[in-house]
Each structure stands twice: as structure tokens, then as C-alpha cells.
């Protein structure tokens, strides 16, 4: 279980910021049941974060047009990766020795290594430059993740030691097996003991994901309602078209029955056109669905574009609903009494 604690450290500046953050981490690590505590300046998927241009070590003209990549930037503590359950693919994590007087280092994600160095395996130990020209050495490679939106394309990211890049915005990630309802008051008490004026916002990782997924949930419900309304309109239209086609051809159908036509022949004559239009409409809907799949994947999290199971299921469902809508007009066509019909004519 992960618990996120966000706070802004008003009244702290300079060297007091990382020192205070270190005190908070140490205090939370002593809580029974807490496995690890990490710091990050912006919780991923929290709607914040900053981007920065990075350059290869050989670049001398640090213009934006010469940047090797525009990357997501985070300031983190050494234990953040363990607390957030982020795997390191190679190299080492950050350490408490990576202070402001130590050489500049960073952990980067896999996509960063590919974009800047062209290889993941050769990135460890290599240098790149940030916007102010500072050279930074890569000491670890982390797995790729989602940093701003769940629906975003993979993006490069770098994680800098918070002792080298202080940030007053503080998000503490606590990993524990304890019940969040029991752990949250203890976290609040420990932080209040350090500074009663600190504003706290405590939430579980699941609650944070619910907030990130809220737009997708709303979009999914809206699309579901629109889809149901569209299906109802389609069924109504198919039924009306089939009923109208049968009503206009009752005399012809009566003559066919009087001449000994089979049930299948009567059905084909009565419903051939509606079924043909239903097939054309289903094929057109399938094509439009494929074309709109990229937009759907952007709106709805984990919606797979061009999923054959989903697309095939929708087409089959609409065909079955269309056949059901033609059932009543079909029964009317089969129940035509040619004697009464011709007498009325």
C-alpha cells in the first residue's frame, strides 16, 4: 500500500528546504509497519511537473533547436524508487552522498537513454547537459512510466537528487502494509511534531489514481450512454424501414403465398432490402470505428485501437439487434392471408 503526502513548505528556503525534507523522511521511517519513505517534488499523474531540454555532451550551442530531447524532470530522494515500486533496469539508485557539493548525477528512464544516447546498455556512466550547461552523469536506468496523463505517449524522464536540486513542493511516498486509515493519523502526527504549520494532504495511491482516471470514467460513461442511444435509434430505424417495406408489398407477398412460394422466399422478398441496408450500415460503422479508434484510445484509458474482439463483437451485436428488429415485420409477412388480401384489393 502506498500513501502520498503533499505539502508546500512555506517559510523554508535555501538549505533549510532539503534539511527539513530529510527530517520528515527520517520521522516517517520510524513509524511501525513503514517499509520505505521517498520524496518527489511532483507526484506522477498529479497534474504537475516540469519539463526541461537536455543536450548531448558534445553539444556546445544550447539552443532549444539543438536539444536531444524535452524531458520530464523530477527531484527525488534516494529511496523514492523503492517506495514508489519503480524498478531500476541497470545501474544504481541515488544516494545520500549525492549532495550539493557532489558531482551532478541522475537516474533516467529507458526512453531518455534511447533518445539521448541511442542505447540503454551504454547509457550508464555517460554525460549529458542541461539547459544551464551543467554536465550530468547517468548513474541508473529506471523503467518507463506515466508521468502526466495515463493516456500520454511514453516520454523521457530524468530523476535528479533533491539535495542537488531543492524544491519547496514536497510529496512524500510511504510504502507500508498497514491499513491506510490507521497509518494516516500517525503520519499526520509525526509531521505535526516537526512543524505544526505544515499544510498536509494525505491520500492513498488508489485515491490518486481515481482522480487521474476521473476524466476517463466520465468519458466512458458518456460514450456508453451515447452508444446505447445510438443503438436504440438504429433498432427503431431498422424496424420502421422493415415494417414500411412489408406494408408496401403486402399484395405482392399475398400473391407469392397464393402461388405456393416457400417461407424463405417470402422472407427474402419482404426483408431483402432492409437486410442489405443493415449489412451496408454495419460495414460502414466498422470502418468508421476503426478510423475513430485512435481518438477513443486517447479518451478512454487502456482502450486498444483496432481491437478485433471489440469491433467484431459490436458488429455481431448490431446484426443480431437488427435481425431482432425485423422479426415483427417478418412475422407479419408470413401471416398474410392471400384470400382476404386479394378480396380487399
Image (cartoon, rainbow, N blue to C red):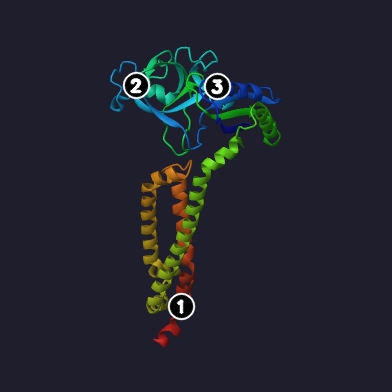
Rounded to the nearest whole Å, what is the CA distance between mark 1 and mark 3? 92 Å
Q: Which residue is mark 3?
A: 16
* Tag 1–tag 2 contact (CB < 8 Å): no
Looking at the picture, how far across and down is residue 218, in whole percent? 51, 50
Q: Nearer the viewer, mark 2 or mark 3?
A: 3
Looking at the picture, how far across and down is residue 36, in whole percent? 62, 23
The structure residue drawn at horizontal position 49% and vertical position 70%, both measured from the top left corner, is: 328
Q: Which residue is mark 2?
A: 55
Q: Is residue 144 above or below residue 124?
A: below
| Left or right of 7, for residue 190 | right
Rounded to the nearest whole Å, what is the CA distance between mark 2 and mark 3? 31 Å
Q: Secondary structure at mark 1?
A: loop
| Picture disc at residue 336 | 1
Q: Secondary structure at mark 2?
A: strand
Comparing 343 with 93, the one in front is 93
The structure residue drawn at horizontal position 50% and vertical position 33%, both measured from the top left corner, is: 44
Q: Earlier in the sequence, mark 2 or mark 3?
A: 3
Q: Residues within 10 Å of mark 1 (few under 14, many from 20)?
A: some
Q: Residues within 10 Å of mark 3 (few under 14, many from 20)?
A: few
Comparing 17 with 112, the one in front is 17
| Left or right of 272, for residue 29 | right
Amino acid at each position: 500500500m502506498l500513501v502520498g503526502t503533499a505539502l508546500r513548505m512555506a517559510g523554508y528556503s535555501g538549505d533549510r528546504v532539503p534539511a527539513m525534507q530529510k527530517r520528515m523522511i527520517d520521522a516517517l521511517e520510524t513509524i511501525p509497519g513503514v517499509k520505505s519513505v521517498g520524496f518527489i517534488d511532483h507526484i506522477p499523474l498529479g497534474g504537475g511537473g516540469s519539463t526541461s531540454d537536455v543536450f548531448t555532451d558534445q553539444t556546445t550551442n544550447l539552443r532549444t533547436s539543438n536539444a536531444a530531447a524535452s524531458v520530464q524532470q523530477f527531484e527525488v530522494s534516494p529511496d523514492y524508487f523503492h517506495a514508489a515500486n519503480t524498478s531500476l533496469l541497470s545501474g544504481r539508485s541515488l544516494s545520500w552522498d549525492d549532495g550539493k557539493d557532489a558531482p551532478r548525477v541522475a537516474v533516467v528512464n529507458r526512453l531518455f537513454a534511447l533518445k539521448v544516447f541511442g542505447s540503454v546498455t551504454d547509457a550508464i556512466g555517460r554525460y549529458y547537459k542541461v539547459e544551464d550547461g551543467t554536465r550530468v552523469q547517468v548513474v541508473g536506468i529506471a523503467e518507463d512510466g506515466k508521468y502526466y496523463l495515463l493516456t500520454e505517449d511514453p516520454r523521457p524522464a530524468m530523476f535528479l537528487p533533491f539535495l542537488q536540486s531543492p524544491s519547496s513542493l514536497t510529496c512524500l511516498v510511504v510504502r507500508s502494509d498497514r491499513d491506510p486509515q490507521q497509518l494516516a493519523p500517525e503520519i499526520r502526527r509525526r509531521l505535526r511534531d516537526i512543524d505544526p504549520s505544515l499544510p498536509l494532504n494525505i491520500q492513498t495511491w488508489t485515491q490518486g489514481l481515481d482522480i487521474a482516471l476521473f476524466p476517463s470514467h466520465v468519458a466512458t460513461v458518456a460514450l456508453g450512454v451515447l452508444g446505447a442511444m445510438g443503438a436504440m435509434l438504429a433498432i427503431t430505424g431498422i424496424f420502421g424501414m422493415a415494417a414500411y417495406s412489408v406494408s408496401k408489398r403486402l399484395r405482392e407477398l399475398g400473391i407469392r403465398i397464393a402461388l405456393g412460394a416457400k417461407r424463405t422466399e417470402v422472407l427474402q422478398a419482404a426483408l431483402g432490402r432492409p437486410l442489405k441496408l443493415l449489412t451496408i450500415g454495419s460495414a460502414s460503422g466498422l470502418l468508421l470505428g476503426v478510423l475513430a479508434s485512435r481518438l477513443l484510445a486517447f479518451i478512454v484509458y487502456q482502450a486498444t485501437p483496432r481491437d478485433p474482439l471489440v469491433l467484431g463483437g459490436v458488429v455481431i451485436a448490431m446484426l443480431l439487434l437488427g435481425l431482432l428488429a425485423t422479426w415483427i415485420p417478418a412475422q407479419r409477412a408470413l401471416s398474410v392471408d392471400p384470400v382476404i388480401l386479394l378480396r380487399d384489393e
